[in-house]
Image: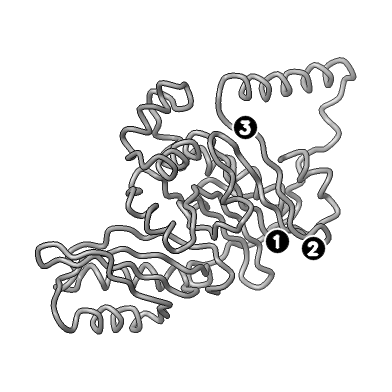
Amino acid sequence: ALPILKSCLAANKVTSVMGIVNGTTNYMLTKMSQENMDYADVLREAQEKGYAESDPTADVGGLDAARKLVILASIAFNTRIDLSDVLVEGIDGLDLCDIEHGKELGYAIKLLAIAKNNAEHGISVCVRPTMLPVSHPLAGVNDVFNAIFVTGDAIGDAMFMGRGAGKMPTASAVCGDIIDVARNIIHKSNGRINCTCFDEKHLCSLENMMSPCYIRLHVQDKPGVLAAIAAAFGAQNVSLKNVVQKSKVKGVAELVVITYDVSELNLQMAVQTLKALPIVEKVCSVIRVEDHDLE
């Protein structure tokens, strides 16, 4: 994707780069989704196949994807992005039931690296499990495949994909870098394209980082609970699309909430408000949604 951004798409003003950039976690999420395997079992299998390291923290915690996103965003937006600028969440806290609930709602969950450049509010960069409509091209990228979905003013939407884990795909990428270095040495060159981070663009504030959201929570099963939940969201300017009760066990109900576009700041405040309510037993999951129909 890097040569594509630097050369093939150089004539474009890129507004967003969104991608699956870690083959290990994509393999794991595919297994969880297609075979109903839980997180611990699928991680063990990924390690046995050589897709995951013995210490998988960088992969499952989202750090590997965040490092790649820093490079992608810096090139795409011609400005310097630091690792500390990236909001990072991994898949290690993801529950199998969230994948199942997502399917029922028409979504697939992927660990996405997302960089957006808003002309008014600035650049946002994040790595996190994200619900995508099953109709989105990235939703169908499975197993160890990686893919980058780019939006530019001239090209529109374009996607580039290939294998992102395993010994041969990794060896192919390493050999390609070695060949580039050898060619540069032979021709006494440092490469045709130097650093393209010539601009200084500001980061988007949490107040202006917008996306819909999926929230799963356990609440007491008694009258007035839904009204209290809706009031807590409303107090933080969070607009709800729907609230669905998924189950009820021993006086505790499981609710799934889908919001319309909400700022990252208001979402965080709403979650803290929910956690403080006596009727809320637990806020189980908070997963962002990339769905233009909810914006």
| Disc 3 residue type (three-letter) | Arg
Cβ atoms under marks 2 and 1 closer than 8 Å: yes
For residue 255, which quarter of the picture?
A: bottom left
Sooner in the amino-acid sequence: mark 3 or mark 1? 1
Q: Which mark is residue 163?
A: 3
How many angstroms separate mark 2 from mark 3 (CA)?
28 Å
**Tag in front: 3 or 1:** 3
How far apart marks 2 and 1 lie (CA) works out to 7 Å
Asked if the residues shown at circle 3 and circle 1 are in contact, with their CB atoms under 8 angstroms apart, the answer is no
The colour scheme is: one colour
Say few, some or many: other residues with alpha carbon within 10 Å of mark 1 (under 14 / 14 to 19 / 20 or more): some
Amino acid found under the numbered disc labelled 1: Thr
Residue at (43% x, 73% y) in the render: 259
The quadrant holding residue 184 is top right
Circle 2 is placed at which residue position?
A: 153
Q: Residue 125, how many percent across, how many down?
A: 56, 55
- Front position among marks 2 and 3: 3
> On the image, numbered disc 1 is attached to which residue?
15
Instruction: Work out whether mark 2 precedes mark 3 in sequence or the reverse, and give the earlier one.
Output: 2
Identify the amino acid type marked 2.
Asp
Q: Residue at x 55, y 57 (%)?
A: 134
Cα separation, mark 3 vs mark 1, equals 25 Å
Question: Which of the 4 quarters of the picture holds residue 226?
Answer: bottom left
Q: Secondary structure at mark 3?
A: strand
